[in-house]
Image (cartoon, helix red, strand yellow):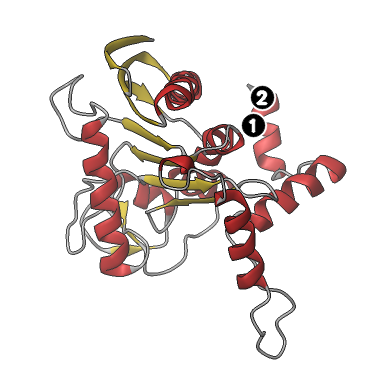
């Protein structure tokens, strides 16, 4: 992993064909370091793959007091609307904000389903939801193995398609086309912003907490127990699993034990 281009506010990193868990972690550290000096940082990583959960890196950024954006273009599995050949990755997009009550993080994949889920469904013999996947001939399928040979669509129709396209383009800023001259290569882009660039008094974390409180205090429809904001359920689930442990499908455990 090496920096191949650098300015006081930016860097481009050659991931050296290392797993994204390592290369994007280094990129996040560097982006935070630069943002502390300049108030802004933009760092891209290419020649790397699979960084896992984007919110992990976003929590690093937010806990350092910054607003962050992370976009990742990935291996093609996703079809353009009307197409039968994958051209997009599942292309996750993540954005995070510091608040007085802790990080607020929005982390999504722009595909209707993530690759790991399709692979898991194939492994345990579970059908996919209808209407999202197609085989290599462009015929609709619920067979995860057929979908892995074909592809699936972005979430949310044309809106998700447009967002997936945008993430793919942001990957180019991270050098995604450099290793093989192909836009399908992986690219990880991090943008880190100090809220004090526009709010020098440091009001943003309190304002963010006020926004969350306002949303959660919205009058609820009958039968609704609570209004949640992005990442709230995830943080609760993390604490629950720390107490109660993790649950895995037995076939997955058996496969891991066999390995």
Per the image, label 1 sits on a secondary structure element best described as: helix
Per the image, label 2 sits on a secondary structure element best described as: helix
Residue 97 coordinates in the image, percent (x, y): 53, 48
Q: Image height check: is 68 above or below 233?
A: above
Residue 255: which numbered mark, if any? Answer: 1
Horizontal side of 243 relative to 76 (left or right) equals: right
Horizontal side of 251 relative to 29 (left or right) equals: right
Residue sitting at 66 percent across and 71 percent down?
216
Residue 258: which numbered mark, if any? Answer: 2
**Front-lying residue, 142 or 204:** 204
Q: Image height check: is 69 above or below 132?
A: above
Q: Image height check: is 161 above or below 38?
A: below
Residue 167 coordinates in the image, percent (x, y): 29, 46
Residue 89 coordinates in the image, percent (x, y): 31, 43
Horizontal side of 129 relative to 233 (left or right) equals: left
**What quarter of the picture does the N terminus occupy?**
top left
Residue sitting at 25 percent across and 63 percent down?
139
Residue sitting at 23 percent across and 26 percent down?
175
Residue 63 appears in which quarter of the rendering? top right
**Front-lying residue, 143 or 133:** 133
Q: CA distance from mark 1 to mark 2?
A: 5 Å
Cβ–Cβ below 8 Å for labels 1 and 2? yes
């Amino acid at each position: 992993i090496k920096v191949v281009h650098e300015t006081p506010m930016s860097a481009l990193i050659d991931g050296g064909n290392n797993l994204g868990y390592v290369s994007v972690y280094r990129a996040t550290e560097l982006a935070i370091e630069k943002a502390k000096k300049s108030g802004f940082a933009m760092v891209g990583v290419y020649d790397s793959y699979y960084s896992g959960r984007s919110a992990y890196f976003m929590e690093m950024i937010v806990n350092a007091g910054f607003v962050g954006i992370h976009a990742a273009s990935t291996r093609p599995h996703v079809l353009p609307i009307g197409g039968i050949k994958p051209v997009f990755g599942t292309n996750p997009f993540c954005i995070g904000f510091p608040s007085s009550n802790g990080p607020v993080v929005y982390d999504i994949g722009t595909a209707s389903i993530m690759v790991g889920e399709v692979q898991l469904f194939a492994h345990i013999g579970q059908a996919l939801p209808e209407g999202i996947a197609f085989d290599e001939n462009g015929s609709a399928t619920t067979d995860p193995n057929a979908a892995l040979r074909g592809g699936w669509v972005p979430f949310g129709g044309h809106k998700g398609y447009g967002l997936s396209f945008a993430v793919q383009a942001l990957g180019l800023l991270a050098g995604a086309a450099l290793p093989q001259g192909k836009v399908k290569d992986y690219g990880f882009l991090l943008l880190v912003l100090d809220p004090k660039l526009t709010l020098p008094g440091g009001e943003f974390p309190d304002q963010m907490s006020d926004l969350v409180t306002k949303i959660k205090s919205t009058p609820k429809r009958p039968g609704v127990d609570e209004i949640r904001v992005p990442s709230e359920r995830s943080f609760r689930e993390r604490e629950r699993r720390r107490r109660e442990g993790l649950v895995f499908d037995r076939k997955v455990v058996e496969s891991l034990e066999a390995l």
